[in-house]
Amino acid sequence: MVAGLYDYEDARSIGRPRVDDAWGYESSLPDSLNTLTDVNNVLDGAIWAFTLVPFVAGLFVRGTGFQYQFAERFPTDIDTLLPGISGRDNATEARLIDFQMVLAPIMASRWTVHHFPPGTDLVTSDTGSAAATIFGHGYVVPISRSTALVLTWKRRKQILIWTGANWVTPIEHFNSPGSSAAELRRAMSAYAEHAVYGPTKESVEDASVQLGSALRIGPSLLGGAAGGIDLGCHQYDYFRILSALHSVPEDTQTAVDDINWSARTSDLDRPGGY
């Protein structure tokens, strides 16, 4: 935790977009994660699109290291070329830009939930994710002591399915062997910035051997191999899906073509309720 991490330094920044507003999904996250991990649940499309997709996207931009990673995109003498501009404030707004750009690739990825045996004791970290080395080409996000969400690249995917009452999104569930847990714990540690968190002292100590040893990577793995999706050109597709959630099948094409920007909030009336 870093106090004021998302605050602007420059007084002239009053009125600029607030990064904290992007984390509005937090209030519904606990219940949404419980729904995601329950193998007996059919995941409501609104829960997935309004809470879970932004949650995963936020993991790529919320960390303390983002400011330094953003600075590496520019020449080292950028301060002399653009004097008087706060690098930290630019990075603060860049969090919002990057956040929006990764929503669509995350939405288009294959989502699978891996269930480990009870007592496995997974760990998480201050970045919340790691390259999914034991699951394939993508990322892993532990979401409980014995459950992990895995996102991997997929060439084609059905985003939403109409049930006759509301839209749902397909999620695959798998049972994973407990023997894979140690590798997953160490991967989480390797992709951490400063700290690993877990339910037991033993699980944290087991993971911390490789703390911070891997270079932090962006969402590039979600683009697939050569010929995969362009991570930068489909950012509006996420908002098209939000529009679709406020429609019924016969109106969906019109909804996604027009993009109903008011559909960015999940509290509007829509077929099936929320």
Image (cartoon, helix red, strand yellow):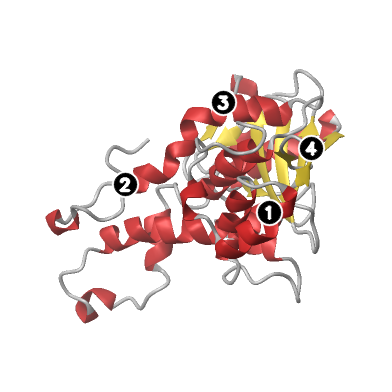
Residue 224: horizontal and vertical position, in percent? Answer: 74, 66
| Residue at the outermost bottom position | 81
Residue denoted by label 4 = 164
Residue denoted by label 2 = 6
Residue denoted by label 3 = 30
Packing grade of label 2 (10 A; few <14, some 14-19, many >=20) is some
Mark 2 or 3: in front is: 3
Q: CA distance from mark 1 to mark 2?
A: 39 Å
Residue occupying the point 54% across, 46% down: 54
Mark 3 or 1: in front is: 1
Which residue is more in the foreground, 127 or 60? 60
Q: CA distance from mark 2 to mark 4?
A: 42 Å
Dividing the image into 4 quarters, which one contains the C terminus?
top right
**Number of the label disc, if any, that sits on residue 251:** 1
Name which of mark 4 and mark 3 comes first in the sequence. Answer: 3
Q: Amino acid at mark 4?
A: Gly
Q: CA distance from mark 2 to mark 3?
A: 23 Å
Mark 2 or 4: in front is: 4
Residue occupying the point 22% across, 77% down: 82
